[in-house]
Amino acid sequence: MVLLSTSLSKRVCVVGAGPSGLVAARELRREGHSTVVIEQNHDVGGQWLYDPNVDGVDPMGKDITDGFLEVHSSMYSSLRIMSPREIMGYTDFPFSTKKGRDSRRFPGHTEVYLYLRDFCEWFGLRDMIRFNTRVEYVGMLGNYDQNGVVGKDHSIKWVVRSKENWQKNNNNNINNILVEEIFDAVIVASGHYSFPKFPSIKGMDSWKRKQMHSHFYRVPDPFRNEVVVIVGSSLSGQDLSMELVEVAKEVYLSSRSMDITEGFSKVIAKHQNLHLRQQIESIEEDGKVLFVDGSWAIADTIIYCTGYSYTFPFLDTKGIVSLDDERVGPLFEHTFPPSLAPSLSFIGIPKKIIGFPFFESQAKWIAQLLSGKRRLPSWDDMMQSIEEFYRSRELAGIPKPNTHDIADFEYCDRYGDYVGFPHLEEWKKQLCISSLQNYESNLETYRDSYDQDQELLKEAFQSPHFTQFLADHPQLLAL
């Protein structure tokens, strides 16, 4: 793609100060844009800002109004990352160990939060962020049709309404006012691991015992000596099973498939009170949970580890951007709605990627498009690309809810080519694959036992990703 010499400064609003929003702020400022980041929590981190306080919120999310959540983070206390830290960092800010902190290769969530806080401080981003402020509304100014805003120069402006001290328990009504501002562009970087998604099971609505989504799970102690049914055998379902089996009387894991990994099979064989079951047929008022194979259990608690939905309750595009069965679209390269680009963009929609570097490539592309250094393809070409992508997913048998599941290093590299972003280093790809293979074979130990990675780690720490940063900042060697 051609790099143009034009440089324009825009006023940009970034929604969210998590991994996507922070790197967006950094790249926007590098391009000379006037940027405001609006963050609903008291600090940076997004999902990685652990919130232990889930008291007073409905564990089934029934108190969610207009799509807004009181608790954003889905982190539980014991959560450790699944990917090794060496591959997670932004390209010019490695996720290195620091004295006195969690130095494990697969650290807990607090270490990721501290890394993001370090990134924020290192690049001086904090003064760009409004904390404890929630975006209530984002909408277009002007006249528009399905091809975007129609005006003299086809430009798009955005009205953003935000509320400071929005929390329900806030008693300071003086500052709890709605502020309205106009921006040239909006970047949605609000994450997608917060809004609980539930299955449809007969008897759910009338069951009298405890039910909750894993979004609200924090520690195992409340489930001591209980019979717990966990719905969903994803990463969180497996993690919670391994944690709860140590305190609960019995744990039943309900899964759509009995085809489980070797690693999880080892865990089940190790614990007599951990049982794998098929999907739930129905839930009875007396506490009985009936599985489709005819077996049953009398449960005290059901925990739904059934994933999360994309949601943008603040965003009003008059139907130009829609959410259809977990497909956000139409989005060119999962980032730009063709009719509204580049004034509206999304960072962090894709799943199953090495997240932070990919978010960085998205942020660079958006920032340079807004400054006029780069141009997007035509509307027709972008729409054609989207349709071709949808057809390829359909032909591959990938269901619509998995539209944004990437799991493809080559795609990430091709994406980077739009903005001259470096391809993923081979050692990063191999470390990622190695950790996934180790996870599948050794679920309980893969985060702490990784002899097979030693040569790759040696290559990683000798790579420019690590050595260049320390060479540029030798004072950090003393830390």
Image (cartoon, rainbow, N blue to C red):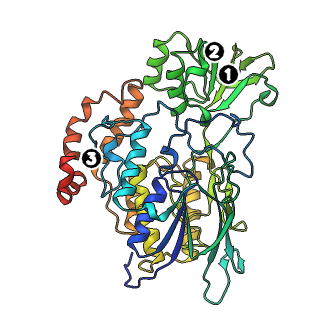
Residue under the image location 28 percent in, 50 percent down: 426
Residue under the image location 60 percent in, 12 percent down: 225
Residue 388 point in image, percent of width and height: 56, 62
The quadrant in which the N terminus is found is bottom left
In front of the other: 141 or 168: 168
Instruction: Please identify the quarter of the rendering in which residue 132 is found.
Output: bottom right
Q: Do the residues labelled 1 and 2 touch (CB within 8 Å)?
A: yes
In the orientation shown, which residue stands out farthest toward the top? Answer: 272
Kind of residue indicated by mark 2:
Glu
Residue 59 point in image, percent of width and height: 68, 34
Residue under the image location 26 percent in, 39 percent down: 99
Q: Earlier in the sequence, mark 3 or mark 2?
A: 2
Kind of residue indicated by mark 1:
Thr
Instruction: Please identify the quarter of the rendering in which residue 307 is found.
Output: top right
Residue 226, numbered circle: 2
Of tags 3 and 2, which is closer to the observer? 2
Q: Is mark 2 on a helix, strand or loop?
A: loop
Kind of residue indicated by mark 3:
Trp
Q: How far apart are marks 1 and 2 (CA)?
A: 7 Å
Residue 93 point in image, percent of width and height: 31, 55
Instruction: Provide the residue designation for mark 1.
Output: 301
Q: Earlier in the sequence, mark 1 or mark 2?
A: 2
Q: In the displayed structure, would residue 339 be above or below residue 315? A: below
Instruction: Provide the residue designation for mark 3.
Output: 427
Instruction: Please identify the quarter of the rendering in which residue 53 is found.
Output: top right
Q: Distance between the residues labelled 1 and 3?
A: 43 Å
Q: Position of 48 compared to 136: left or right?
A: left
Q: In the displayed structure, would residue 410 be above or below residue 284? A: below
Residue 15 point in image, percent of width and height: 56, 61
